Image (spheres, coloured by chain):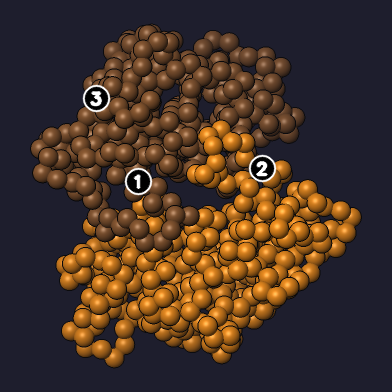
Amino acid sequence: MNDAPLLSVDDLRTEIRTARGPLRAVDGVSFTVRPGEMFGIVGESGSGKSVLGRTVMGLYTSGPAMTVTGKVVLDGTDVHALDDAGRRRLWRSRVGMVFQDPGTALNPVKRVGRHLTEAMRGLSRAAARDRAEELLRLVGIPEPRRRLRQYPHELSGGMRQRVVIAVALAGEPSLLIADEPTTALDVTVQKQILDLLGRLQAELGTAIILISHDLAVVAGRADRVAVMYAGRLAELAPAGELFDSPRHPYTEALLASVPRLGDPPHSVLRTIDGAPPDMAAPPDGCRFAPRCRHASPACAAPPEFAADGARAVACHHPVDLGGA
Amino acid sequence: MAGTGTTHLRSGDRVLSVEDLVVEFPAGRGRRVHAVSGISFDLLDGETLGILGESGCGKSSAGRAVMQLPPPTAGSVRLHGTELTGLAPAALREHRKDMQMILQNPVAALNPRRRVADLVAEGPAVRGGRPDRARIEAALEAVGLDPATVWDRRPHELSGGQCQRVCIARALMLDPRVLILDEPVSSLDVSVQAQILNLLEDTGKRLGLSMVFIAHDLAVVKNVSDRIMVMYLGKVCEVIPSAALAGSALHPYTRLLLASVPEAPQGGAEPGAAELPSPLDPPSGCRFRTRCPLATDLCAKEEPKLRRTADGHHVACHHASR
């Protein structure tokens, strides 16, 4: 794998203006994604993971509703320095997005074919249709020619999500941002969509940012995983290491709170006391400290996101490797 | 799958017994949605039965039909030996009090204009006696809420997890013997999900409740249940002790579900992009045959009946064998 990053995010902050004052949804996040990498971002609701995805994409940018500071550089292009036309060019050809709810991501009055061809430039009508058919075949839709003529409501949820992925792939992007792509789908369909994303990553070499609240979804697929809590990264590590030996107490607690098929029935689950902080007035210092078993007076100062080889953790008292 | 069949029903002290439950909805032009097509199950005192299946399998329709919301198209639902179907409304209200339901979206399940204390008091209040303050406080404390903090709050001032606790407190105010839980944790974050699952487990044990836990998440269902009933397109595929789910499941559909869990290895049993057949016109014979790797002509002709393969383990499949 090439070490030059495809995407680098540096000290990104997204501040949303609300009636109660500014809400720092993303508050100083830095990471890089390598070409062809599957990069997972996990976090609970309100952790800022979706805002992060949209800010990286350039869908959220400084304006009346919010302020974005920090840098997002995709393949040499500073996403937040682009004008509107530049961003549209970027979305057409360099980065695609897959949304959570395939039911609302597609326009109900446009046929499948139209969704695929509208962003294509410089192709004849017939060539665009052939290309659209090829895209549907690529995402595993049977009878693609017939599907092109159908409307979104004629497709099942899984098929719609395949169409959304095909639309995102139409410009042959080098980066695909998938925000909870399987949350609205049944388990058997979820598996198909995740396998599809894995196949696209392998066959096309597309880098994918997979955002999910479900640790298991990310566990088996991502190369590296970032855990987000209250607008900041708590921990970043290669997927296997993160799940085998979490270093941030939040990651550890989150993993222990998920029921597992291998555990006997009626096992008591670990819980995390308290609730995530109010993002309009987050605590100083470590944001997880009020809920943390290991918290000490040192946690009143914000922990540095300290890198150690391939891993990084933002904690004054990281869990020891190889045992908690 | 299919199955009909009642070999898995037990004799003895059953709190709830459901036989040949059928739920159909009119779909216009004389067509009918076959949501639940003849399922049977029973519940012993203090037992938790998990009902597992994907969307459209009829698990929620089954749960609601047991509650008589609305009453099933056909079949029998007996609670403590009293047949609920066909009871007059007043008698139904009296008997149904022993059975309470918890729904998936706890925020939508609560009246947004009412305060927590009133919401919790509502059950006894409509039955003619508003409970005293101490009883409401005890109910809130039992579900891990601080009465002083939440007393005057309205649902929008609470988190999803807190709303689900209020729903549980509300249900328990009527001293039910049976809880029907329809996806009670699927709209919650994982850390909150763990809190609610632990709360249900503790409460169930403390009060000796029997529960029907309906959900699509295999690990969650396995964690809370003693037995699991797997449903597909309105029928029962398999009834299995939950400890045996991961290792001994026999029905091809149960196995497909197990292979689809994200932590399962990639690839594996891939039933293609096969889609769920329409419940308007379900396949003949075994309803799973259109997606089944084991399907033969027999499966189209004859519906498999549940048969016993081990103690407490029943499978509705012509071909599955251990």
Question: Local crowd at mark 3 within 10 Å, few (<14), some, or many (≥20)?
Answer: many
Q: Earlier in the sequence, mark 1 or mark 3?
A: 3
Q: Chain of mark 2?
A: A
Left or right of B258 on screen, residue A248: right
* Residue underneath mark 2: A271
**Residue, disc 3:** B5
Q: Chain A: give its colour.
A: orange
Asked if residue B184 can be seen in this view, the reply is: no
Residue B124 shows in the view: yes
The answer to whether B39 is drawn above or below residue A270 in the figure is above
SS class of the residue under badge 1? Answer: helix
Instruction: Name the subunit of mark 1.
Output: B
- Compared to residue A287, the image places residue B255 above or below, namely above
Viewer-closest of A37 and A181 = A37
Which amino acid type corresponds to the residue marked 3 in the rendered image?
A: Gly
Q: Residue at x 67, y 17 (%)?
A: B135
Chain ID for label 3? B
Q: Position of residue B256 (x, y in %)?
A: 34, 48
Tell me if mark 1 has few (under 14), some (14-19) or many (20+) residues whose alpha carbon lies within 10 angstroms of its own: some
In this rendering, the answer to whether A266 lies above or below A63 is: above
Q: Nearer the viewer, residue A248 or A22?
A: A248
Q: Quadrant of residue B278?
A: top left
**Residue placed furthest toward the front:** B322
Is there a contact, CB below 8 Å, between mark 2 and mark 1? no
**Mark 2 near mark 3, Cβ–Cβ under 8 Å?**
no
- Out of B237 and A124, give the one closest to the viewer: B237
Which residue is located at x 60 percent, y 14 percent?
B130
- What residue would you read off at disc 1? B255
